[in-house]
Image (cartoon, rainbow, N blue to C red):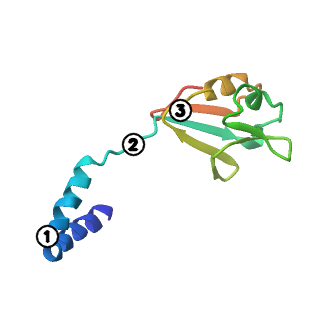
Amino acid sequence: MVLNRLSWSINLAQDIYEPSFYIIIEQIETCKVIRMAFKVIHDRPICIGCGACAAVCPEFWEMAGDGKSDLKGGKKIGDTQVLELKEIKCNMEAAQSCPVNCIHIEENGTKKI
């Protein structure tokens, strides 16, 4: 679907605005797809609110008003929070410090913890 829209845009640019066509092609050639290598998954209902994750990794974890932890910037999918990152940073330590194992780490689709 995106490819069809892109092809249509290129055809339109070529037919109507010939100079723009070359700019569009140049932008497409220099565009890079950035794939996030790591996924942090917080199974929030299991969280007991011990605060270990927020203590070792405050850049990504905070304690919420209900006493459980929240993954900063995480996308809520049901009761789960998911955050995709290029670099894992301190999230591995957060997952390892969790006494109930409610923080999971995936690297390129493979579960690490």
Q: Position of residue 103 (x, y in %)?
A: 67, 33
Mark closer to the chain start, 1 or 3: 1
Q: Amino acid at mark 2?
A: Ile
Left or right relative to 62: residue 20:
left
Query: Looking at the rendered structure, which numbered label has been put on residue 34?
Result: 2
Left or right relative to 22: residue 45:
right
Above or below, 3 relative to 29: below
Q: On the image, which quarter does residue 71 sit in?
A: top right
Q: Position of residue 62 (x, y in %)?
A: 75, 39
Are the residues at dot 2 and dot 3 in contact (C-beta closer than 8 Å)? no
Q: On the image, which quarter does residue 93 sit in?
A: top right
Q: Position of residue 30 (x, y in %)?
A: 26, 47
Left or right relative to 22: residue 105:
right
Q: Quickly name the residue at label 1.
A: 18
Left or right relative to 70: residue 50:
right
Q: Quickly name the residue at label 3.
A: 106
Give the position of the N terminus as an image quadrant. Answer: bottom left
Are the residues at dot 1 and dot 2 in contact (C-beta closer than 8 Å)? no
Give the position of the C terminus as an image quadrant. Answer: top right
Above or below, 97 relative to 69: above
Above or below, 30 relative to 54: below
Q: Position of residue 98 (x, y in %)?
A: 74, 26
